[in-house]
Amino acid sequence: VTKLRRGLDIVVATPGRLLDLMQQGHVSLNAVEVFVLDEADRMLDMGFIHDIRKVIAKLPEKRHSLFFSATMSGDVVALAQSLVHDPVKITVTPNQPTVEKIVQKLMFVDKENKDSLLISLMHNTDLKKVIVFTRMKHMANKVADKLNRAGISAAAIHGNKSQTARTQALADFKRGKVQVLVATDIAARGIDVDNISHVINYNLPNEPETYVHRIGRTARAGLDGSAISFCSAEERDYLRQIERLIRYHVPVDLEHRFHSETARTATGADARPAPKVVRPRRPRSGASTRGRSGSHGGRGHR
């Protein structure tokens, strides 16, 4: 706070802390010339979007804005379009990924058998310190719960968890109190944990570069490491994209008892996720149906 009072050229802050300082009168953004939003996808995943918008509302209209994101999902693109005007887009193509020192294995499995396969692996193989990756937050919770009920210590980490809960889960994982950390990609970004023996892709990522980031959590500092990927029928196309990127056909384990030939041989529409069904919105209680479709043209009578 003392340094802020003296005046600074650059301030690096989390959205919540910056808002606190602004409300206390320690920071004014009236003279900001350059605004940088880093790790925008992680900010979105962590639920910081409302704080970000509050900060931006206090910035001068004339400014230079820089927006950085490792991934560009539809939500991230929408956020970018709402924050920057007439932007220049720069995409950095990653170098050829290096995954040679990681022992990779692929297991074809029906999605309803993934939990059983994971528990079987944890009970019957030498998996010591493991990160399990899921695509969705609710899936991370479900997998962690299933593991704990099976007697395998696990904790979930994702954007809907509080900072305190995420910090505690990571500390328990580092100390060995928790054997398995179940994580979403964005929540796991920046995690630096030594001696991870295995990375398990419970869901294959829909962006092939993410696969490289995931499995790179193991086999660090010259140590051995393994990556095991579960692939159901609707993830077959994701697998094709991953193998094209890494220029390597991941060896397949055909001997495990949950092996699925349906997943292994899936092609066409069966090899892709089913399209999302958009459900019509339910009318609000008390709203007039006639008002929606009649001459008033609104959401009910005014």
Image: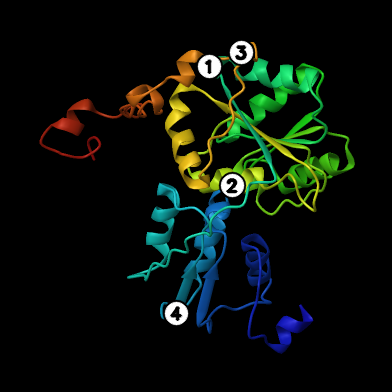
Q: Quadrant of residue 12?
A: bottom right
Task: Provide the secondary structure element on which disc 1 rests.
Answer: loop
- Residue type at tag 4: Arg
**Residue name at image x 39 percent, y 28 percent:** 272
Q: Earlier in the sequence, mark 3 or mark 4?
A: 4
- Residue type at tag 1: Asp
Q: Position of residue 78 (x, y in %)?
A: 39, 54
- Residue type at tag 2: Val
Task: Provide the secondary structure element on which disc 3 rests.
Answer: loop
Q: CA distance from mark 3 to mark 4?
A: 57 Å
Q: Position of residue 267 (x, y in %)?
A: 37, 24
Tag of residue 212 = 2
Q: Which residue is mark 1?
A: 110
Q: Earlier in the sequence, mark 2 or mark 3?
A: 2
Q: Position of residue 282 (x, y in %)?
A: 33, 26
* Residue 8 to residue 90: above or below: below
147 and 11: which is toward the camera? 147
Q: Which residue is mark 4?
A: 63
Mark 2 neighbour class, 10 Å CA radius: few under 14, some 14 to 19, many 20 or more = some
Tally of numbered discs: 4
Q: Earlier in the sequence, mark 1 or mark 3?
A: 1
Mark 3 neighbour class, 10 Å CA radius: few under 14, some 14 to 19, many 20 or more = some
Q: CB of mark 1 within 8 Å of CB of mark 3?
A: yes
296 and 9: which is toward the camera? 9
Foreground: disc 2 or disc 1: 2
Mark 1 neighbour class, 10 Å CA radius: few under 14, some 14 to 19, many 20 or more = many
Foreground: disc 4 or disc 1: 1
Q: Earlier in the sequence, mark 2 or mark 4?
A: 4
Q: Which residue is mark 3?
A: 258
Task: Provide the secondary structure element on which disc 2 rests.
Answer: helix
Q: CA distance from mark 2 to mark 4?
A: 36 Å
Q: Quadrant of residue 132?
A: top right
